[in-house]
Each structure stands twice: as C-alpha cells, then as structure tokens.
Amino acid sequence: MCGIIGKIGKVNCMKDVLEGLKKLEYRGYDSAGVAVFTDEGVKRVRAVGNISALEEKLAGTNLDGRLAVGHSRWATNGNVTEKNAHPHRAGRFTVVHNGIIENAAALKTAYFENDAFESDTDTEVAAKLLDKFYDGDAGRAIRQAQRLMTGSWALGILCDDCPGTLFAAANGSPLLIVKTESGNYIASDAGAAPDPIEVTKVENCEYAAVTADGYTVYNENGDALQKAPLAVAAGALSLDKGGYDHYMMSEIMQQPEAVRRTLEALPDSDFIGDAKEIRLIACGSAYHAGLVGARLFEAVRRIPARAEIASEFRYADPIIGRETLCIFISQSGETADTLAALRLAKEKGAPTLSIVNVPGSAIATESDRVILTQAGREIAVATTKAYSAQLAVFYALALGRSEALSRLPEAIYTAIAENDGKCRRLAERIAGCRNIFFIGRQLDNAVSQEGSLKMKEISYLNSQAYAAGELKHGTISLVEPGSPVIATVTDPAILSKTMSNLHEVKARGAFTIVITTRALAPGLEADVTLTVPDVGPMLAPSVAVIPMQLMSYYTAKALGCEIDKPRNLAKSVTVE
Ligand code: G6P
C-alpha cells in the first residue's frame, strides 16, 4: 500500500516520475503528490484523488527538475486530505513513505512535544527526526532515525543541501533501486521505471544514496555494501491495456499465457515430500486459490489439508510442526498478514513453501522453498491472472502433469471467447440487482468464493458465496424475486444436489444462472446457462472462474465503476 518513486537524471524528470506514479497507482489512490528540486529549492504539489488530479494541479506550473520524488497514497494514519498527502516536509527534509511507523506517537511525545505538526501522519514524524539529527551529514541522520523507528517503511528522501542525491531507506516495505539509460530511480516496484538495466533491493535497515551516475547502499552502521543486483525479468507479459478499456480486461485475456508460462517454468521437483498435513495460508483471492488447493490435496493425495486466512492463522497459536507443510500464497509476496504467518510457521519449525508472483519479494525470499507464478505484473486491483496461475500450480502439485493440464491454457482461452458476449449481456441485468448469490459444492464452492469476491470488489453490489447446501440455513431469506443466483456445477457426482438447491431458489423467484461444462449442460434447468470446456472436475475451477470474472467486469462497467481501482482497496496490503 502506497507507492513511492524517485528519479535523478541528467535532464528534467518530472514526466518520468508522473509516468512511474501511474504504474504504482495500484498500490493506493487516495491522494498523490510530488516534490522536485528546482533552482529555487524543493517545491511540492499534492492533490486528493488519483494522479490525474495531481496532473491537473501541475498543469501550467512548469515545475521540473533533475531530481524528484512522487507518492500515491492508501491512507493508514490520517484522513484523506491534502495536508496528509505526501511528500511531507520538515526543516531541510522532504519525504515520501510507504509503510507504518508504529511508534510514531511515542516518538512525537519523546522528541517533538512542543512542535506544531502540519499533518496527522507518521511520515511527518520521520521527516522531523531526519531534520533533528541532521548535522550536515544526511546519511548519519538517516541512520539515527532508522534506529529509533519501529514498524515498516520505504522512504524516498530529499535533503535541501544535496541537490545531486536521492536518498532512500527501507525496513519491511519494498524498495528497489532501478538503473536506466536516462537516470536512476528508486521505486516500490521495479515496473515503475521503464527499461531497467539493473535492479537492486534495499533490504531491512539499509539505506542508499542514489546519484545520476550510480548508487551506494549502506548498512545500519554506514558501511558501504557490495550488493548483488536482482535478475531483471525478460519478456514479461504486456504492461499496457492491450487495446482494452481496463487493465482488468487485458489481464483476463492474458490468463491462458500466464497459466502456460507458470506450468512451463514449474520445476519437476517433489514439493510435498512426506508431509502428514498441509496448511495453505493467504489473504483475499490467494486464500481462495488455497481453498482449491486444499480440496485437491485431500481429494487426490489424501493428505489432510486446509486453507486458512493469514490474519486468523497468525493469532491462532496453530498446532503445526515438522510434519505440517505450510504453503503461503501471495501475488505480491508482501502482504503483511501472510508474511507474519510465514514467520510464525518458521518459528514453529514447519517447512514452508511459497507460491508468489513477484520474485525477490519478502515472502519469496523468506520461505524455505518458492514456486514463482509467471503471471507477469498485475496492475488491476482485482486479481485475475495471478489467481489463475496459482490454481495451475496446485494442479501440478496435487495431480501431477497430464495431457489435460497441458491443454488447460487453450481451454481457458475458449472459455473466455465463448462467454464474453453472453456475460456482457447478462451484466446489464445483474447491474440492476441488490443481492447476488454464488452457490456450489466442493471445488465449485471454492471457485464461487472467488467469483463472488470479484463481483463485490469491483461492482460494489452485495454478493455472497455459499456452499449450496448451506444457503437454506439462513441466507436464503435474502433471495428476492429477480435476485441472481449463480450456481456452478462442473462435477457430475454432485450435480443433482446443487441443481436441487438452485430449484429451491427458483421457486422463490430467483433469476438463475448456471455455469457448467458443455457435456453437463443439456438437461440443466436455469434461466441462463453459461458453458465452459470439459477439462474434468479437478481442473474445472480454472474454466468456471472465467464467466465469473467476465460477469463481474461487465457489471462494474455497466454501473460506471472505477474497475481497475475500486474504492477503498489497494492491491498490495502491507498493513495488518
Ligand atoms: C488485496 C488484493 C487482492 C489480493 C489480496 C492478497 O486484497 O486486492 O486481490 O488477493 O490483497 O494479496 P497477495 O498479494 O498476498 O496475493
């Protein structure tokens, strides 16, 4: 949450910083701001809202320079107001920050009791600390401030006395130095800088001094470090909207390729070993992928497995140990609760495996073993291709490679092509409803959880997913005449059971939609039937999720919602 960027080049760089900020907007979009070194010193401009609001404010100012920082905010401390927007300034320091300084209130009382503060943020406390400890040596001030702060931060720092240096410091929040032809960047995500030549991570308690020609990273004692750059991803999947109106649609379309690449890159290695039990721990859609994984491990490998929400797991004093394989699933690799759960599992001596989309991220680095999904950079807040890539990993782990699995990308492609138009038309109808229900059993229930989340997060309609047999124990009271109930039935063994539940809601006036396979479709009674290719019940979640994603996308579009950046959400949740 929150994106930070900074650039120092040989020519003016405001344009590049704004371009980079747009690529980081997925990390938060409550407000945005920039600060730039000009001939008259450091100037900053901030605006509530997204980057376009900032651009409007900047238009006509001619504000530019060779050294600039930028920030897009997901509010944690302090309301969404301009005074709380970054960059924050104190004395000779200007700061952009991602993370939470947990002891900010205590530091404020200890050091600045009588000082006036411009904002309600923890970031301003960091800026004040830097200014307090500054004696002409910015590095020393950074070291002293880092020693006092607790919590997480990635900081981009300008010092009024250093027009040729961009400073950066990190602890627990991602921060990369990216070398490019046109100058050097610091950024929360390497994708914010075009054509990286070299990417280096600033690790916990380290800080860096970046100039137009190079950079030096220091440890907490001020010793210069020899850091090995990270591998720069080659041939990544497209970062633009590919001609679509939204990143989300472009990413839906990239799913066959994301799955194909993930399966290709997956090493043929035994990741499960002699585990007696498996826990799959994650948040959001990654947790939903874990629900599918758990079902598969139990059904096929007969290993007791359960998916757990990371924020619950970490406080549950879980009963785990050497024989419990803990699998952590995360697109970003930096979700705070998932990371904390990983650390807890390690403390308890459990073997850990992570399934992560961002190489070099904290979860990827800290787990015993890692499988990298190859979905490429995902920008839309509502995940699609990363979820699909995670499912592909579970198929390979639980079922092993097969002819059917190698044909999955093609089946996903067909599911998209055959449902796009139908889902667009259906969305017009769904958009007018108050409550939407997704039902299914077993794997169909697991994938329905994801479909329902997609619907509510981008359309803001109330959507719930229920185990089909459980609906009648309460939630059915919410079904009104015309309420859409979307039943997924891909497993012939339990088809008739779920269909009975669908008939129960039909009898109460529901508008019934069934997602099923071509083979099972004939004879199923529903107002609308959406068919997906026959890939077998185990792989079915990957094709069944497609019409769910498309319905959600087109419903949100019909309602005029901000699809790529839904309100109140952020893609990367680095707070508890
Ligand atoms: C946020 C995103 C979700 C994502 C979840 C977990 O809530 O909006 O799309 O599933 O975080 O993120 P992770 O990066 O750990 O997969």
Image (spheres, grey):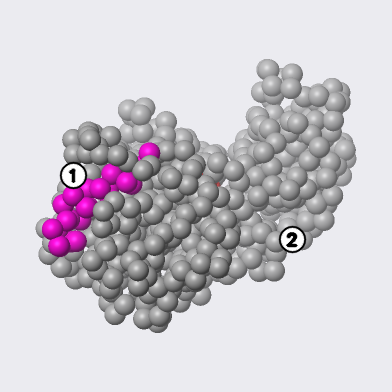
Residue type for callout 1: Leu
* Residue 423 placement (x, y as % from top left): 79, 50
Residue type for callout 2: Thr
In the image shown, does 546 or 153 lie closer to the viewer? 153
Which callout, 2 or 1, points to the residue nearer the camera?
1
Name above or below for residue 551 compared with residue 471. below
Q: Which contiguous range is marked in magenta?
A: 120-142
Which residue does the image show at 64% across and 65% down from the upper left? 241
What residue did someone put label 1 on? 148
Q: Is residue 125 magenta?
A: yes
In the image shown, does 508 or 401 lie closer to the viewer? 508
- Can I make out residue 330 in this image? no
Which residue does the image show at 18% across and 35% down from the upper left? 110
Q: Is residue 198 left or right of residue 558?
A: left
Assess whether mark 1 and mark 2 are in contact (beta carbons under 8 angstroms): no
Secondary structure mostly taken by the magenta-highlighted segment of the chain: helix
* Residue 178 placement (x, y as % from top left): 36, 71
The image quadrant that residue 168 belongs to is bottom left
What residue did someone put label 2 on? 414
- Can I make out residue 213 in this image? yes
Q: How many marks?
A: 2
